[in-house]
Image: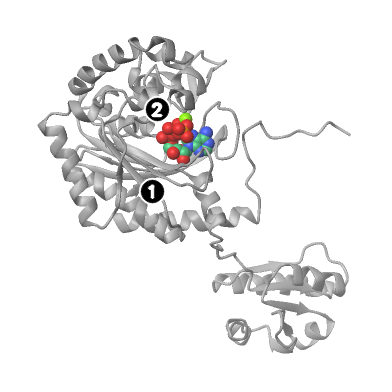
Amino acid sequence: MNAKLSAVKGMNDILPPDSARWEWFESRVRELMRAYGYRNIRTPIVEPTALFVRGIGEVTDIVEKEMYSFTDSLNGEQLTLRPENTAAIVRAAVEHNLLYDGGKRLWYTGPMFRHERPQRGRYRQFHQVGAEALGFGGPDVDAELILMARRLWTMLGLHGLRLEINCLGQADERARHRSKLIAYFESHQQRLDEDARRRLYSNPLRILDTKNPAMQELVEGAPRLLDELGDESRAHFDGLQQLLSAAGQDFVINPRLVRGLDYYNLSVFEWVSEQLGAQGTVCAGGRYDTLIEQIGGKPAPACGWALGVERVLDLVAQAQVAPVLPVPDAYVVVAHAPALSRALQTAEELRAAGLAVIVHAGAGSMKSQMKKADASAARYALIFGEQEWLSGEVSVKSLRAGGEQQQRSVPVQPATALLECLRS
Ligand code: ATP
Ligand code: MG
């Protein structure tokens, strides 16, 4: 026997019956996006490495150490499995001039790839659903995006998610804050961990995002970006807060919320759960008004979020929200070999009428076929035996637990009586 092969570490198979929860979730997402007028966009899983280096920023966790990058051995191109999708959406929007007649509301879903240490809620292939509003500058769209996520939690039966928001201002405000931050951390050199020392001059803002408990006190005392905001940034942030309050949405202002990616400005936000251990952020986003220009487009503002599907589904499982499992309407038992083609034809007619029908495969005794019918959770068994074959009928047997196991024979042609029987 050949040696067994397994999936790549940190990359998961999603198997039935769990996949039913994924399908249920995806349907809710589609309803949500339709309700808000967001249109689906699909981009390749592989992109030029340069897109992410330019789009995400060189001094970020993702670009520094998490990307699956490789050289295409056929033509030498530098390629990367997408670690996130915002840069690619912006690339596509610029490449196809999507903003020629104004802003666009877009959404996507799919796998993302990051070389991280696998643990609960952190995988090397994981999935995101994302919403991006390109070409809109006001805090109204920031609020729309946040409230959209809130509606999704409701649709999924999730409660108790906390909304954290912050304002990252604009480049000049961040530059002012940056000098103060560097001076502050320089004066506490001996308390910096290795990560912080490395980032001190390259990306000091990210030090604020440290997960090292030993650094918490130092970071708490650091100069706040919020104190550097000018009137315009402040007005944007106030605007967002007013809209959220008016919509009855509670939030916490977290001055240390800086997000992992370089491209954000003004509003940033996260939805956080207490039920997921260390990986509590289920949805994160913000405004990225300079990214479109950075990717080569005409300057235009934008805002968006991405949620981690595995983390959200972990919450759904904990909330014990039962997804509606797809149950077949009928299981076809072929107990008389010559009846097979009639059975198949009947099954096709039922499917054309919208029913879900499983036809037993591989023959076998009536008893073993009925066992499979029971295990399939189908509502009815349709029995094509010798008797039925001779009379041009099919026997319909209810498989519902508790119900009487009554059996009726109905004509196969026309299928009207059978359909009526299965729909009752
Ligand atoms: P974290 O701080 O947990 O590493 P991040 O800032 O890197 O998160 P984003 O790039 O903002 O995450 O991605 C948005 C969301 O995608 C996260 O809030 C999370 O729910 C999910 N996510 C990110 N990385 C992973 C991963 N490796 N495995 C599973 N989900 C992930
Ligand atoms: Mg990360």
Residue 140 % position (x, y): 19, 47
Give, as a three-letter code, the residue at label 2.
Asp
Residue 125 % position (x, y): 56, 35
Q: Which residue is mark 1?
A: 162
Q: Residue at x 33, y 31 (%)?
A: 256
- Foreground: 249 or 16? 249
Per the image, label 1 sits on a secondary structure element best described as strand
Mark 2 CB lies closer than 8 A to ligand 1: yes
Q: Residue at x 24, y 57 (%)?
A: 247
262 lies left or right of 299? right
Q: How many marks?
A: 2
In 3D space, how far apart are the residues under numbered discs 1 and 2 (Cα atoms)? 18 Å
- Foreground: 254 or 123? 254
Q: How is the image coloured?
A: one colour
Give, as a three-letter code, the residue at label 1.
Arg
Q: Quadrant of the N terminus?
A: top right
Name which of mark 1 and mark 2 comes first in the sequence. 1
User: Residue at the left extreme?
Assistant: 231
Q: Residue at x 33, y 22 (%)?
A: 205
10 lies left or right of 80? right
Residue 325 % position (x, y): 59, 64
195 lies left or right of 182? right
The quarter of the displayed image where residue 138 is located: top left
Q: Which residue is mark 2?
A: 209
294 lies left or right of 189? left
The quarter of the displayed image where residue 415 is located: bottom right
